[in-house]
Amino acid sequence: MISFIICLALLIGGYFVYGKVVENTFSPDDRETPAVRINDGVDYVVMPKWKLFLVQLLNIAGLGPIFGALQGALWGPIVFLWITFGTIFAGGVHDYFSGMLSERNEGASISEVCGIYLGNTMKNVMRVFSVVLLVMVGTVFAVGPAGLIVTLLGNSGVKGIMTNAEVWLWIILAYYFIATFVPIDKIIGKIYPIFGICLIIMAIGVGAGIFTHGYTIPEITLQNLHPAKTPIWPVMFVSVACGAISGFHATQSPLMARCCKSEKQSHFVFYGAMVSEGIIALIWAAAGCAVYERTGGLTTGLTQMLTDAGQAGTVYDVCTKTMGGVGIVLAMIGVIACPITSGDTSFRSARLVIADWFKIDQKSYSKRLVICVPLLAAGALISQLDYQVVWRYFSWSNQTLAMIALWTASMYLFKNKKLFWVTALPATFMTAVSVTYFFYAPECLNLGTKVAYPIGLIAAAACLILFLSKSVFKKDGAKA
């Protein structure tokens, strides 16, 4: 339990201390932001700082810091270290620079930002990569909640058309179309803060319930407690994404970058939302380690629960055991509303990537329809595929996107004669994670650790050397 408290304190302190280092490295100023300068009433809309924070939190979180943290808890309390230090030195840095670089470039999508600092080839790669990733995320976050609604209604005795998953899927997709199409402050700006508060309350309730119900959070050990002995490196670092660092956030931060009244709000909005997500993930990881029985020190109870009930069922079970009847209500809101709120902003971000790509002005209803209709049609087609097949490659592609976003920020910092190691070190680390996983994972090349480990380290070193050769050893600075 002491380990948990120390990690919690480090996360809070990290926001004030290292978050300030990151902010000072970038040096926000009083220049006019895109929200004020462009203000088209659709995507560029000034919002108050508290609302920016809550919308950003729900944009980047959803069920990510819950599902990912529970999955990470399979390795035991060692996951606390990745959540804590990953959030402070990687995730918070990634999210802050993703938002700020967008603000400095007219609210541009991450693909366009990458092109500005890494060249046209990377821009085109990221355009395709981002749209495919976002449509996949939006689709799986439609299929999943549809199935959960049917399960909950079925358990409540409801019958007929309301327990047809296909019907709920089309209802959710219809909502996605509306949320993608209308101005950001009409739906997202109004309901997201409410669900963001629910996400925070659910985490606080679970954390308090662990203590009041007599559960004991185990202390950190460097041992691998996974029953299947799945290696910690790199699998845990990919499984726990949204609670430590996630490339998906780079696609979401531009949404709020287009709504900030001042650059100086960004420490609270971007770095602060990531730290909050890290705290939520830490609490859920602690619950996974504390609530379920261990056999011979291994996390057999949590493994069995995830196998039998799935991730949503495990969330429901944890909420029930830590909060009772209130927990059941919050769990229902969480496992249904949170993924839906991640899905709609995924499609909205995809619309903006395409609009930036083809220079399509989004003030016009007809021009928004030209993008929205094909996007949602693609989502509807993908939703008919096997859920597991669609989701299989998301975790790896998610961390790969984070790696690219960090290298982009590193090049920006170098060109502007700033301390680029703030982003270059986590970029190198995430390169090692992404490449190692690609060579190791069964769904990728499946070459085992003996091949994957050295290749991952060599690739990370090579990328760092390439960056230094293109930057430090080549004096070609650019303006801010």
Image: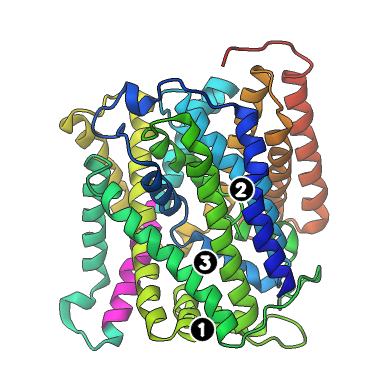
Judge by depth and name the residue closer to the eye, 25 or 446: 25
Residue underneath mark 2? 15
Q: Amino acid at mark 2?
A: Tyr
Q: CA distance from mark 1 to mark 2?
A: 38 Å
Badge 1: residue crowd in 10 Å (few <14, some 14–19, many ≥20): few
Q: Quadrant of the N terminus?
A: bottom right
Badge number at residue 243: none
Q: Quadrant of the C terminus?
A: top right
Badge number at residue 308: 1
Q: Is residue 90 above or below residue 369?
A: below
Judge by depth and name the residue closer to the eye, 446 or 244: 244
Residue 372 image position (x, y, % from top left):
25, 40
Mark 3 or mark 1: which comes first in sequence? 3
* Magenta segment main secondary structure: helix
Circle 3: element type? helix
Q: Is residue 128 above or below residue 329?
A: above
Circle 1: element type? helix
Circle 2: element type? helix
Q: Is residue 343 above or below residue 79?
A: above
Badge 2: residue crowd in 10 Å (few <14, some 14–19, many ≥20): many
Magenta region: 138-153
Contact between labelled residues 2 and 1, with CB atoms less than 8 Å apart: no
Residue underneath mark 3? 67
